[in-house]
Image (cartoon, coloured by chain):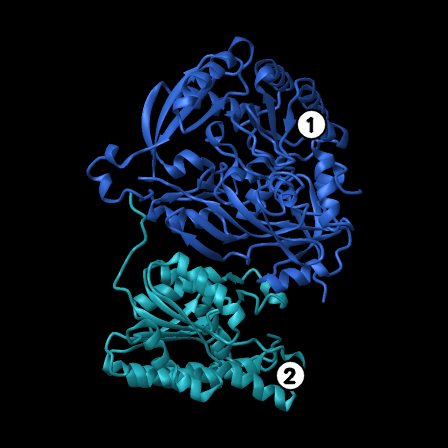
Amino acid sequence: MSRTPKRDDPRNVILVGATSGIARPLGRRLVARGWNLVVTGRDAARLAPLADDLRVRGSGTVASLVLDPADGAAVAGLFGAAAALLGAPPDGIIVCHGTLPDESGALLDVEQTRDAIDASFTSAAMVLAAAARALEDRPGAFLAAISSVAGDRGRQSNYTYGAAKAGLTAYLSGLRNRLHPRGVAVLTVKPGIVRTPMTEVLPAARSPLATEADTVARDIERAILRRQDVLYTPWFWWPVMTVIGAIPEAIFKRLKL
Amino acid sequence: MSPAPQTLSGWGRFPVGDSVVATPADRAGMARAVGGDHGAGLIARGLGRAYGDSAFVAGGTVVETARIDRFRGFDPQSGLLDVEAGVSFAEIIAVFLPRGWFLPTTPGTKYVTVGGAIAADVHGKNHHRHGSIGVFVERIDVMVADGTVVRCSRGENTDLFHATLGGMGLTGMIMAACFRLVRVETSRVTVDYHRTADLEETLTVFEAGDAGSEHSVAWIDCMASGRAMGRSVVMQGRNTPLGELSPEARRDPFGLPRKRVKSVPFTPPVGLLNSLSVRVFNEVFYAAHGNRRRVVDLDTFFYPLDSIRHWNRLYGPRGFIQYQAFFPRKSSLDGLRELLSTIVASGAASFLAVLKSCGPADGAMLSFLEPGHTLALDIPYRRGVIEALCGRLDRILLEHGGRLYLAKDALMDGTSFRAMYPRLDEFLAVKRRYDPDGLFASSQSKRLGITPA
């Protein structure tokens, strides 16, 4: 008989975009481990009930912080604010915020292109830059961010989002290269199709390849604990994307993907 | 953009109906769903464990509570838990059992939501002592037809409270509720098993042992006929105190064994639970349980079928009915005897048949249980045959002052329903007050004439 939740050293972690579909089950898993969390979101009215939920579920501290990840000054002050809320400096961050642009009309629209890239890349890179500065002298710390399999190869149906996520994947790769000698882990999460409020309007959410957000959250939790570099979740996206990546461009350009 | 309708059913997989499904993530989304256009009506749905047609409305809109699933607060002094409607009993156990708290009562599956449990006023193996879940509910927040959220309790909007409790979601959308958890010292139950020879002995064992048992239930062999009719294995249990655990088990008093969850991966083309396989199972089960005492874990005691995911598929593509009858104490023995002999004569197999003694009613207007006995059994669906059989069973219930449980019902007619639920008019008056245009409706409420067809 043993199934009382596993406990490890409680960690102090910032969860950015905590109300997003993947962050919700992930936050629940982390507080169940006894970790202390600062949850951030743009909308205070949505953030408060989420923080209450995590407080009941966990035994550690849960603090909430309204944060617009596009606001440079706020992002620069994030780690200081989180440390004050937790009473200890954070030693990990998970960047989950993001929106999936509707690309049906956006692909040829100048303003929408910029908005889509800002939402999926610029603000995430800003948060990671602040995190790298705060954590580079803390061996054992970790950074994780949610990129996407869509960043592995641009497809006609969502290449703006894909390009932004490709940028994020490259950013994380460089950051990992820089922080590895300092003992700081950097995790790139590449989910496939996940059933969340962000994707439920898409026909893809009904695809047999679609995964529940909690499955993705479970994989992320494990990858963080293992200090993994790149996570495809569910796992089968790794061979799928390897094949897609190997198709010569002369053929790929003719495919309807 | 209006999404395509989905074909839904209850846990019995009969009947089915097409509804548009919305899954809002917060109160604003819920209000939008209630304010929209719903065709034939609107009904909330939790984890879909009600057996019949109470959690969908053919041609209407189903609002799932899957994402309305946040804990709101907990008071470790009183055990009072404040949760949103979509939180499941399984989640509550996962969070609170390790801290020494358990549900005050629980149905035979933990995959039910708090909203569904309140709407069906669920009961468990301790009903004879405490009553159903409603006894432990302090207050309910209901989003009524105009989109506002009304708080109700035994002190405030009492009409709405007693109509919503057991009201099958017909007063509005249950958004959140506050109810009491109870302290346990361990995750185990100490169970005494008694094998009985017939129905009369089963009821006698209940009578003799229930006062001293926190939990009590009988598995009853519905295939046994003649003098053995009603033979059972009665299980009477109490929460195991810490002091009775072995020193080794005491190191992890709230642990549960990690069970390999088996799954029925697809629906077999014909039901596998037929009279032959059930007869074999029943013989083996009866023979395997002698009179003895065992300490078992909570999952094994309360949720034996939860270890087989999609077990409802075993009844094949046409599904099954779960028939749950209640008889008041004075007519229990005669009523149960007549019900059982009718079922035995029909040759309808029942794999899972459960008999339980019942305690006090909780004041819900459509309350199911009061002092007496309740029998629940599965009947595989066979067109024409099952309608006739259930009609006969309903008449037996009526003759003995009994009633049928709405969370299981799939076939009853409006006349029988009206005769079984004497406080229906009182309920309808409350429904009119909070839902004057009859927005909230299910396929069941239309069949039973609670709402216009």
Name the residue beneath numbered marker 2.
A106
B450 to the left or right of A1:
right
Q: Identity of the amino acid at label 1?
A: Met
Q: Does the image show residue B138?
A: yes
Chain identity for the colour blue used in the image = B
Q: How many marks?
A: 2
Look at the picture and state if B46 lies above or below A82. Answer: above
- Binning the other alpha carbons within 10 Å of mark 1 as few (below 14), some (14 to 19) or many (20 upward) gives many
Q: Position of residue A178 (x, y in %)?
A: 30, 86
Q: Nearer the viewer, residue A140 or B417?
A: B417
Q: Position of residue B300 (x, y in %)?
A: 39, 36
Let me know if marks 2 and 1 both belong to one chain. Answer: no
The disc placed on residue B420 is: 1
Chain identifier, colour cyan: A
Judged by depth in the image, the label closer to the viewer, 2 or 1, is: 1
Which quadrant: the C terminus of chain A? bottom right
Q: Residue furthest front?
A: B155
Q: Note whether B381 is above or below A89 in the view shown.
A: above
Residue sitting at the far right: B453
Image quarter of residue B256? top left
Left or right side of B122 for A107: right
B134 on left or right of B169: left
Residue B273: x percent and y percent? 55, 30
Check disc 1 and report its element: helix, strand or loop.
helix
Residue in front for this viewpoint, B204 or B220: B204
Residue B322: image x %, image y %? 60, 32
**SS under mark 2:** helix
Residue A234 seen in this snapshot: no
Residue drawn 26% across and 37% down?
Answer: B242
Q: Quadrant of residue A60?
A: bottom left
**Residue type pointed to by label 2:** Ala
